[in-house]
Image: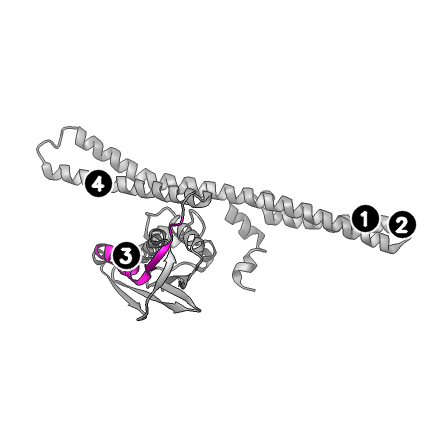
């Protein structure tokens, strides 16, 4: 049994995950209900043995009671778990959105006040600098809004798939080319290798491009100073296989089970890169699953991360 499965039985860890008091934690309630079921079945068994002579009937009554109580418990715990998860995501949503909007809004307000104050009428260079600040911060807010809209459309099934046969290696090369200025400015060396075979896939090129962009964007953002990114496109288990490997900050082991959840950002990610909505990897996984593929990663803190996905061969 791996650490992720063991964590399911760690009541305090689960309560911390949902950020709820112990008495509201689904795992704690499950434990309490389990004790109630045991106590109830023992009581019914004792009463049944006293008033019912046939032991088979007693056993059936005890079994029936245990099953009914277990079903009721399961329904109640599932409901509490959904409520606790919704509460956690609401808190993370508020924290992420408020944090991501506070900086750009402050900069926009400050730049607008400077530009309208009349104190820079004769300094055109300063005008250009403040207009650049306005543009950059407007773009940050636009990206956050776009991510939120994409998540909403994916969850409601309102983001249609427009599948067509495409050459995946051409799509990867085009996306890497678009990232070239960002890669060069970050002083990063990127290498792209692919098998010398046609990579034809019947898929949605626009949505798949979002996946590749998220992989590359994460790899670039979490490499400090000089770094290397290795992009590979090949075949694995009769599927097209794509991966992006970096030697960046990596993902702490305790955070890895949450990495594809909405609004989640690991602590070392927040430390090294303040920008980010925590939605990119959730969007990425949802898209890959919709396209009939699989997605995953492997990572060690301080040594880098490899994200990968597979797609069915046409």
Which quadrant does the C terminus fall into? bottom left
Image mark for residue 133: 4
Alpha carbon of mark 1 to alpha carbon of mark 4: how far?
72 Å
The answer to which of 198 and 71 lies nearer the viewer is 198
Magenta range: 161-181
273 relative position to 291: left or right:
left
Image mark for residue 175: 3
Crowding at label 2, few (<14), some or many (≥20) Cα neighbours within 10 Å? few
- SS assignment at label 2: loop
Would you say the residues marked 2 and 3 are in contact, meaning their CB atoms lie under 8 Å apart? Answer: no
Alpha carbon of mark 4 to alpha carbon of mark 2: how far?
82 Å
73 relative position to 200: left or right:
right
Q: Earlier in the sequence, mark 1 or mark 2?
A: 1
Alpha carbon of mark 2 to alpha carbon of mark 3: how far?
76 Å
Residue highlighted by disc 2: 52
Image mark for residue 264: none
| One can see residue 22 in this view | no
Residue 137 x, y percent position in the rendering: 26, 40
273 over 127 or under it: above or below: below
* Quarter holding residue 6: bottom right
Q: Main secondary structure of the magenta part?
A: helix
The answer to which of 99 and 53 lies nearer the viewer is 53
């Amino acid at each position: 049994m791996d650490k992720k499965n063991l964590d399911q039985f760690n009541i305090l860890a689960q309560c911390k995950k949902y950020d709820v008091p112990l008495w509201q934690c689904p795992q704690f309630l499950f434990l309490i209900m389990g004790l109630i079921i045991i106590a109830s079945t023992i009581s019914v068994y004792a009463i049944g043995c006293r008033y019912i002579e046939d032991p088979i009937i007693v056993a059936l009554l005890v079994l029936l009671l245990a099953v009914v109580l277990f079903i009721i418990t399961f329904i109640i715990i599932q409901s509490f778990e959904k409520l606790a998860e919704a509460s956690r995501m609401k808190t993370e949503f508020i924290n992420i959105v408020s944090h991501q909007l506070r900086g750009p809004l402050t900069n926009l307000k400050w730049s607008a006040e400077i530009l309208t104050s009349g104190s820079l009428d004769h300094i055109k260079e300063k005008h250009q600098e403040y207009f650049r600040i306005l543009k950059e911060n407007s773009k940050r807010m636009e990206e956050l809004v776009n991510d939120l809209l994409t998540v909403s459309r994916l969850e409601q099934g309102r983001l249609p798939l427009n599948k067509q046969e495409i050459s995946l290696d051409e799509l990867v090369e085009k996306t890497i080319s678009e990232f070239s200025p960002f890669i060069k400015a970050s002083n990063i060396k990127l290498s792209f290798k692919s098998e010398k075979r046609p990579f034809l896939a019947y898929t949605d090129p626009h949505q798949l491009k979002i996946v590749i962009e998220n992989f590359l964007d994460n790899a670039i953002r979490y490499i400090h100073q000089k770094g290397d990114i290795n992009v590979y496109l090949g075949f694995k288990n009769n599927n097209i296989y794509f991966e992006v490997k970096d030697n960046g900050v990596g993902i702490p082991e305790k955070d890895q089970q949450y990495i594809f959840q909405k609004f989640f950002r690991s602590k070392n990610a927040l430390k090294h890169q303040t920008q980010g909505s925590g939605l990119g990897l959730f969007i990425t996984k949802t898209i890959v699953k919709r396209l009939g593929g699989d997605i995953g990663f492997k990572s060690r803190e301080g040594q880098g991360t490899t994200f990968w996905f597979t797609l069915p061969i046409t």
